[in-house]
Amino acid sequence: MKNFADLTEREVLAVAISSEEEDSRIYMSFAEDLKERYPDTAKVFEEMADEERGHRHRLLEMYEQRFGAHLPPIRREDVKGFLRRRPIWLTKNLSLDTIRKEVETMELQAERFYAKAAEKADDVGVRRLLGDLAEEEKGHEHLAAKLTGEILKPDVREVEDRTRRRLFVLQYVQPGLAGLMDGSVSTLAPLFAAAFATHQNWQTFVVGLAASLGAGISMAFAEALSDDGSLTGRGSPWLRGAVSGVMTALGGLGHSLPFLVPDSWPNAFWIATSIASVVVFLELWAIAFIRARYMDTPFLQAAFQVVLGGVIVLAVGILIGAS
């Protein structure tokens, strides 16, 4: 890799040309990815892509005037100090806020590159062009804000906010809630069966730990392999799988941890069981709240369904363990 200070004027222009071309493709990739989810925001990124293509044409004209038609094979990846762009295939299904932050970083880096390049340019015309581009890149944030204000009217913003909420529910809340429900409810039977069969806290905790981690791993793979997100827009399958798996494990561990109460304590089993029962109650009500908050289920209905199911599973575990 070359140091920026070692670049010739010809190489600086070549890097700038390739950078503008790549940034234009990235903006178009953002626009295509957002077209179905946020069609009006996609127009903003199409405008930004047009701006980058205009910069590239101006740079090419200057380069041909100074050095001819042949471009040296150098890109910003060959120069030390440049931040690496995300590969285009990693920009799919990103959240709107993530994309906007990515754009801010791109524009800041481009502005600093042109400012530094203008300082070391010897040719007056090249210096003027690079300085102008630095100012234009600096103003791109204002351009984006202007385009956003012109294109994203209040009613459009309202629609996009609803879409963003729906995607948040699909990508994070839904798999997390499914995992929490599975971990909190499905582990009740083996945990309390072991508790009332042995009356030993440590053995009960080991059963709960195994059930929680096993359920977490199972749910993670089940969620990740069930939908790749390409058609449903639910995002990265591995991210959803991780969310589901972690929440499943946490749901089971919540009422397993009280059985770490040492068996040497007086009434240790009943202390641990009482604490675990309180934790179970809190978990079930948390699930009911999340369903009411994000899944548009009336709270009392959600509470009745979740608590009833949890109590049935708990009772089954206790009856089996005590038999």
Image (cartoon, rainbow, N blue to C red):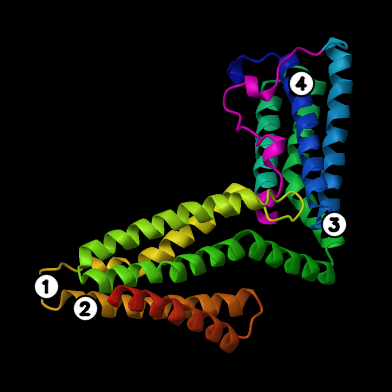
* Residue 242 in view (yes/no): no
Q: Amino acid at mark 1?
A: Trp
Who's the residue at 75% across and 14% down the image? 10
Residue 322 in percent (x, y) is at 28, 77
Local secondary structure at mark 4: helix
Mark 2 lies on a secondary structure that is helix
**CB contact under 8 Å: marks 4 and 2:** no
Residue type marked 4? Leu
Q: Which numbered disc covers residue 16?
A: none
Disc ID at residue 39: 3
> Looking at the picture, how far across and down is residue 6, in whole percent?
61, 14
CB under 8 Å between discs 1 and 3:
no
Distance, label 3 to label 4, CA atoms, is: 34 Å
For label 2, the crowd category at 10 Å Cα-Cα, with few meaning under 14, some 14 to 19 and many 20 or more, is: some
Q: Looking at numbered disc 2 in the image, what kind of residue is underneath it?
A: Ile
- Mark 1 touches mark 4? (CB < 8 Å): no
Distance Cα–Cα, label 3 vs label 2: 57 Å
In the image, the segment drawn in magenta is 71-100
Instruction: Between label 4 and label 2, give the one nearer the viewer.
Output: 2
**Can you tell which of label 3 and label 2 is closer to the viewer?**
2
The answer to whether 52 appears left or right of 237 in the picture is right
Q: Nearer the viewer, residue 229 or 43?
A: 229
Which mark sits nearer the N-terminus, 1 or 2? Answer: 1
CA neighbours of label 1 inside 10 A, class few (<14), some (14 to 19), many (20+): few
Q: Given the image, on which type of amino acid does mark 3 rest?
A: Pro
Depth check: give the residue in front, 105 or 250.
250
Q: How far apart are the two marked residues, 4 and 2, measured between alpha carbons?
A: 73 Å
Q: Are marks 1 and 2 in contact (CB under 8 Å)?
A: yes
The label number, if any, that marks residue 13 in the structure image? 4
Q: Say which residue label 1 marks.
A: 265
Q: Is residue 207 above or below residue 30?
A: below
Distance between the alpha carbons at the discs numbered 1 and 2: 9 Å
